Amino acid sequence: MIYLDNAATTLIKPDSVIEAVVSAMKTQGNASRGAHGATLTASRTVYDARVKIAKFFNFDKPSNVVFTCNSTEALNIVISGLINDGDHVVSTDTEHNSVLRPLYHLRDTKNIDLQFVKANEKGILCISDFEKIISKKTKVVVVNHISNLTGNVNDIKKISDIAHDAGAVLIVDGSQSAGTMNVDVKALGIDVYCFTGHKGLFGPQGTGGLLVRDGIEIEPFKRGGSGVQTYNEDQPKEYPTRLEAGTLNSHGIAGLSAAIDFISEVGVINIHKKEVELTKYFYDAVMKIDGVKVYGDFSDFDNHAAIVSLNVKDYDSGEVADALSNDYGIATRSGAHCVPRLHIALGTKNQGAVRFSFSYFTTYEELDVAIGALKEIAS
Amino acid sequence: MPLLIIYVKMDNSDFHYFIIFDTYEDAMAMHDALDKASIENKISPAPLDLVEGVCCGVSLMIMPDDKEKLDEFLKNNNDKNLKYEKIVKAERKFKPNRDRYC
């Protein structure tokens, strides 16, 4: 199989990640639950992972690295824990349902004032539109770093400046940026960064988290066992315990920790560079195929993710993806990609799109097969 | 095969000091910092009777001989990420040198 669905989940993981999970399953007890050897092994793994993740994203407070099971959970935690009745919230057309659905739910249940920055036909968000919509009444701005459909990278620093000038908190969905490009949460001015472990970070599914800037008080999403402050009737207020009730996925976190080691060793800059080259190679080739239409802004490959979404003539995207899978053994993702507003903006609500997404482990030979397949399908 | 010699400090003291924390993460951070500063410490269950149960489930146990070094370290510490709730002194309730048959 040629796996080109890395924006959904990276399939090829470093061996060290797999070995770390196996080793953890054989040796780790329950993290933060006591002081015997097995629990300390788990606690050490989890603690080291927090420290590594903080360093990886240039975040200076390891104790505010909160583990979740993925970005969706992280986004639900921060959206539901930070937004109150009647708050003015700004988001965008490019968001995933992991942002949209929690926001729609709050709109319907807490009567929040929800406004969206529109995407144009290339899926681009205009910064001036953020300036128009964000005001002193805005409590929270939620935006993705990279679109999972177009691969466009949003200018987080500029959005952060606008949000902070208005006194709003900026939540960033980093599902597609974590591990695929250098993310410096401090330099970008991010208040809460949500990430998942199983995509660009090469970690196991069931891992992810959020980085919470000091001073941001998120109401707990769940309450329960913490291994600490047992006689406190409320969930402890200190991070990360505040948001981590229940046993952590320390086996998965061991894998995520090894994945961070791998990326740090290779260098996230080198990973991004290789992915940019792969993307440019594929984009240049498919743009020459009659009947292929590519979506997104490819004016600056260095500032673009390894995602190329396209359609062939007026063919249903599902039919194309199925042909790619059945006839050529190529795994892609068709349909709506959980981004309803963006598909509407791109004019692809009915057709969907076929998304090709690459990783550091993708080869040019694999891309050549995919390019050849598209030529045949379009012929 | 190289011979591995592990030096274990004899602990015959009648009491210990325990650093108490709000979270497990604070305890791990302090443990690493004390290790780096060569101040002997052991991750240990917190003495609940002395902290009324309102604390992190673990503590760092410090032997009396090292208390002075610990105080000096904490006095000079500028790392904002190193936090602790308090330090308590706890007497040992059972004999460290008891006879053992199993």
Image (cartoon, rainbow, N blue to C red):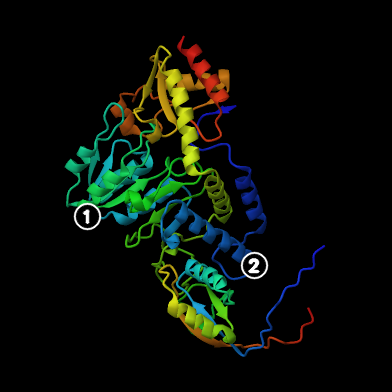
Mark 1 and mark 2 in contact? Answer it, CB < 8 Å: no
Q: Is residue A5 left or right of residue B95?
A: left
Going by the numbered disc 1, the residue's amino acid type is Gly
Determine the residue located farthest toward the top in the rendered image: A379
Determine the residue located farthest toward the right in the rendered image: B1
Which residue is disc 2 drawn over?
A37
Between A79 and B24, the one lying in front of the other is B24
Label 1's element? loop
| Rendered location of residue A356, percent (x, y) | 47, 27
Subunit ID for the residue under disc 2: A
Seen at 17% across and 41% down, the residue is A132
Q: Is residue A57 left or right of residue A205?
A: left
Marks 1 and 2 on same chain: yes
User: Is A229 drawn above or below residue A329 in the view shown?
Assistant: below
Name the image quarter holding the N terminus of chain A.
top right
Q: Is residue A241 visible?
A: yes
Q: Residues within 10 Å of mark 1 (few under 14, many from 20)?
A: some
Report how far apart the C-alphas of labels 1 and 2 lie in the structure.
46 Å
| Rendered location of residue A7, percent (x, y) | 46, 35
Subunit ID for the residue under disc 1: A
Q: Which mark is residue A167?
A: 1
Q: Is residue B52 visible?
A: no
Going by the numbered disc 2, the residue's amino acid type is Gly
Seen at 49% across and 59% down, the residue is A51
Q: Residues within 10 Å of mark 2 (few under 14, many from 20)?
A: few
| Rendered location of residue A320, percent (x, y) | 47, 19
User: Is A212 drawn above or below residue B85 in the view shown?
Assistant: above
Q: Is residue A71 left or right of residue A12?
A: left
